[in-house]
Amino acid sequence: QVQLVESGGGLVQPGGSLRLSCAASGFTFSSVRMSWYRQAPGKERELVALSTSTGGSTNYADPVKGRFTISRDNAKNTVYLQMNSLKPEDTAVYYCNALWWTTVRNDYWGQGTQVTVSS
């Protein structure tokens, strides 16, 4: 079955960095769009960054442009989110998402990893 397992979250001071990882299994990773979302307390889940199946195209939410980088290793079935210059407003639970279409929409989520930016 499809599994997405995030890791790498934690507590970091403002200005610091973290790298999140999402290990995927149960589907053809190299054919799938992978994304990172986040959800802060009291707010809706929002898209942070996405990577097309080959990694040749990426897209970022405006608040993280220039600070976050999404990348993927199709040989390891893993997608990463490098987060630099972290701000308190980046505090949220970060989720990995896999999305592809067959005859139906296939939309899967990881369990989430907490990122807290605080001094």
Image (cartoon, rainbow, N blue to C red):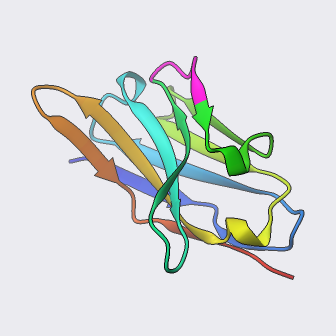
Asked if the stretch drawn in magenta spans residue 55, the answer is yes
Residue 47 placed where, x, y %?
Answer: 51, 49
In the displayed structure, does residue 49 sit left or right of residue 27? right
Asked if the stretch drawn in magenta spans residue 36, the answer is no
The residue at 52%/48% (across/down) is 36
Confirm whether residue 82 shows in the render. no
The residue at 80%/40% (across/down) is 66
Confirm whether residue 113 shows in the render. yes
In the displayed structure, does residue 116 sit left or right of residue 2? right
Q: Which quarter shows the C terminus? A: bottom right
Q: How many marks?
A: 0
Residue 61 placed where, x, y %?
Answer: 62, 44
Picture quadrant of residue 40: bottom right
The residue at 9%/26% (across/down) is 103
The residue at 82%/52% (across/down) is 84
In the displayed structure, does residue 74 sit left or right of residue 3? right
Picture quadrant of residue 14: bottom right
Region rendered in magenta: 53-58
Residue 20 placed where, x, y %?
Answer: 63, 54
Q: Is residue 59 above or below residue 62?
A: above
| Magenta-drawn stretch, dominant element (helix, strand or loop) | loop
Q: Is residue 98 above or below residue 75?
A: below
Residue 9 placed where, x, y %?
Answer: 64, 66
Picture quadrant of residue 57: top right
Please name whichever residue, 2 or 14, is drawn nearer the observer in this view of the structure.
Answer: 14
